[in-house]
Structures are given as C-alpha cells and as structure tokens.
Amino acid sequence: MDRASLDRIDQGILAELTRNARISHAELAAKVMLSRNAVRQRIDRMERQGYIQGYTVVTGAPGHGTVSAFLMVYRKDRVRGADVIAVLQSIPEVVLCDVVSGDFDLLVRVEARSLERIQEIWEQIAATPGVTDTVTAMTLSNYIRRDAAAKPAQPGNAPGQASLPVVSPGA
C-alpha cells in the first residue's frame, strides 16, 4: 500500500479530505475536476485499500483541556511484545504507539484530561507484564501538529503509507 501508487487525483482527494473530512462529494468533485460518482468510487476504493482508515473529529481548541506526555517503554521481550501493545491499544488516551530503534522499544503518546489521568495510565503501563521500565516526558508546548501523510508525495522523498489517524472525541 505505497502512496506512490496513487495518482495525482487520488492524492488531491486525500489532501482535500484531510483539510475537511466533511466536504461534500460535489464540492470535492469540483476541486479535482471529476464527477461526483467518480469521486465517490475513488474514495470507496481508497477506503477498501486502507489509504483512508477513518474520519477524524477533533473537539475543542488544540491544547485546551488536555495534557500530553510521551512514555518511552522498555519491554522484556522485544520480539514477542504483542501483549504490551494490546494493553496500549485498550487505553483510549493512547493516541500514538511506535516501535522504535535505540535504547527503548516503544514511544507512546498519551493525551488525557488531567495530570492525574496521565499518572493512572503510567501506572497501568508500568504494571503491564512484559514492561521492564518506562521514562516519561511531559509535553510543555506544542508548536507543530499536522498529518504529514496527508501531504502529496514530493519528488525525491520516500513514499509512505497514506492514512488518516482516527482520534476518539474527548480523548
């Protein structure tokens, strides 16, 4: 599922949907110069192929009412650590979990309503079988927040998978 396999029109549709997921098929069709039916068919195909994985609702103003932290998680067994990831998937405030190279194994971003909730989540993750240690970094400010996958591929850049993250409202 390589984004390079999408044509310019598909990439344009993804870019428009990223800017406004509520755009009508008629308005989108006018922007990419296709019929409404052709746009609908392309969106349906990109959903089936996994390029579009969901539509996001973001509530409230960014940075208001939420606290975020990054947890660096060390796992006992890097190869068979699926149980740890399954626990992370069950926590709605976990908005990102990447397997990374280097000293620690997982980089986890948590966004919650309070510091107390961040601490509860940290305690839950630290107590998870298979987790040997955690390091937490609280987010003080957020200056850039964007979906890099929504930008059209540029010549010379490695193509990546185009997907739209699904964020639970109020998480």
Image: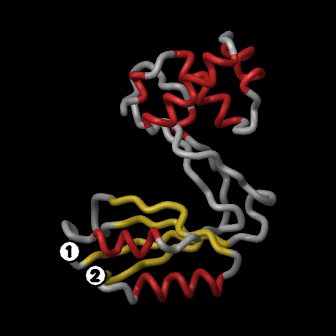
Of callouts 2 and 1, which one flags the residue occurring earlier in the amino acid sequence?
Answer: 1
Q: Residues within 10 Å of mark 2 (few under 14, many from 20)?
A: some
- Judge from the rendering whether residue 110 lies leftward or rightward of residue 133; answer left or right: right
Q: Disc 1 residue type?
A: Asp
Q: Give whichever of 15, 25 is nearer the camera.
A: 25
Q: Position of residue 43 (x, y in %)?
A: 57, 29
Q: Position of residue 5 (x, y in %)?
A: 39, 22
Residue at the image point whose x is 66% and y is 15% from the top: 32
Disc 2 and disc 1 in contact, CB within 8 angstroms = yes
Q: Give whichever of 126, 1 is nearer the camera.
A: 1
Task: Say which quarter of the image contains residue 132.
Answer: bottom left
Residue at the image point whose x is 63% and y is 45% from the top: 55
- Mark 1 falls on what kind of element? loop
Q: Position of residue 101 (x, y in %)?
A: 28, 58
Query: Where is 80 relative to 152, above or below?
Result: below
Query: Where is 152 relative to 129, above or below?
Result: above
Q: Disc 2 residue type?
A: Gly
- Mark 2 falls on what kind of element? loop
Residue at the image point whose x is 62% and y is 25% from the top: 40
- Judge from the rendering whether residue 127 lies leftward or rightward of residue 78; answer left or right: right
Q: Position of residue 97 (x, y in %)?
A: 44, 62
Q: What is the tally of numbered marks visible in this picture? A: 2
Task: Say which quarter of the image contains residue 127.
Answer: bottom left
Q: Residues within 10 Å of mark 1 (few under 14, many from 20)?
A: few
Quadrant where the C terminus sits is bottom right
- In the picture of the structure, the residue carrying the numbered disc 2 is 130
- In the picture of the structure, the residue carrying the numbered disc 1 is 77
Residue at the image point whose x is 61% and y is 16% from the top: 38
Q: Give whichever of 49, 72 is nearer the camera.
A: 49
